[in-house]
Image: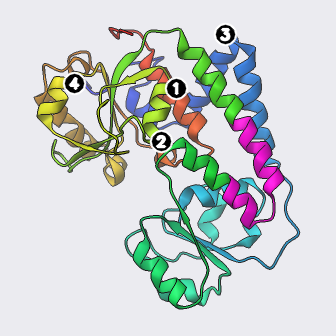
Amino acid sequence: MRWHGQETGGCSSLSMANNTLSAHAYLRRIWCGGLLIAVLVFGEFTSFAASPKSEKDTTKVVSLVPSFTEIAYGLGSESMIAGVSDFCRFPAAALAKPRVGGFLNPSLERIVALSPTVVVLSSSQVDLQRKLEQLSISTVSIKTDSLADVFATLHRAGDIFGKPEQAATIAEKWRKQLAAFREEWTSTSKVRALVVVSRQPNALQDIYVAGPASYLGELLEIAGGKNVVSNSNRPYPPVTKEQILEFDPEVIFDFSLGELAKNRDASEVHLAVWQSLSTVQAVKSRRIYAITDPHFTIPGPSMFETLAVLANYLHSAGATRDK
């Protein structure tokens, strides 16, 4: 018996969460119940993919931020992307761009060799930013902690690529989509949930979760969830096993598998440790969902697929809910 996955529509939670088709299927179910949401979602993805390309060719950007890279492609500005980080995997076309290393080990030599006019990096890459500026290479620092940061990144990309009006149009469509999702679940009872973003392999140690002010925490709330971590101002605070026992969530979303997701047996071992918290409602009701698709955690256009997956599991049968 696969305790970690509640069967839904013939698929386990593990397989459904790793399948973007499940998200689109859920959007179709929303359409059946409310035409507005389906029209907005479909229209946005069509518009985002069909954005016209810029004629500018003087800008050369090295992007170390996956969400910025994806937005750049959505704006039709991929020709101005000179290089990307190892974690810039979406859209698939970005995989063909020159790689300059990961988040913790970016190669300064590779970046400089690409002769960028600007390097877009994470706000936490302070040391790299200092080194680049010492070489007179312009940098743009990007935050990715919240939904507000997503919109700020979109507008900043519009400015960098000379497409501020196009970025503003997309931003307005995104806001309408988010409002439609929020309205869909406003009148429903909230499901108490915990979103785990990282922990030690095969152990409930060094656990970090999505707080209410985080990107994933905000999506959880929009999808009709009630974050059991309600007293932290940090986007992704640490918690202990003892705290999880006190929280007693009805649903647990576990985003922590990482590379373990490639091996089914390793995934099962990693997830099996939740059984040690046998008194927690999510464990008793088999409502622990492993979300293995890395695209769902990137703050950007994929937020609507992430919302659909979260809402699908939050509101599936079997939850005891309260306001």
Instruction: Please give the residue where the numbered disc 1 appears in the rendered image.
Output: 222
Instruction: Report x, y in % for residue 6.
Output: 35, 20
Q: Amino acid at mark 3?
A: Gly
Tell whether 201 sits left or right of 319: left
Q: Earlier in the sequence, mark 2 or mark 3?
A: 3
Mark 3 secondary-structure assignment = helix
Position of the C terminus by quadrant:
top left
Instruction: Please give the residue where the numbered disc 2 appears in the rendered image.
Output: 215
Q: Amino acid at mark 4?
A: Phe
Circles 2, 3 touching at the beta carbon (< 8 Å): no
- The part of the image, by quadrant, that contains residue 210 is top left
Q: Earlier in the sequence, mark 3 or mark 4?
A: 3
* 57 over 283 or under it: above or below: below
Instruction: Please give the residue where the numbered disc 3 appears in the rendered image.
Output: 33
The magenta segment is 155-174
Instruction: Please give the residue where the numbered disc 4 appears in the rendered image.
Output: 247
User: CA separation, marks 4 and 1?
Assistant: 20 Å
Instruction: Report x, y in % for residue 48.
Output: 76, 45
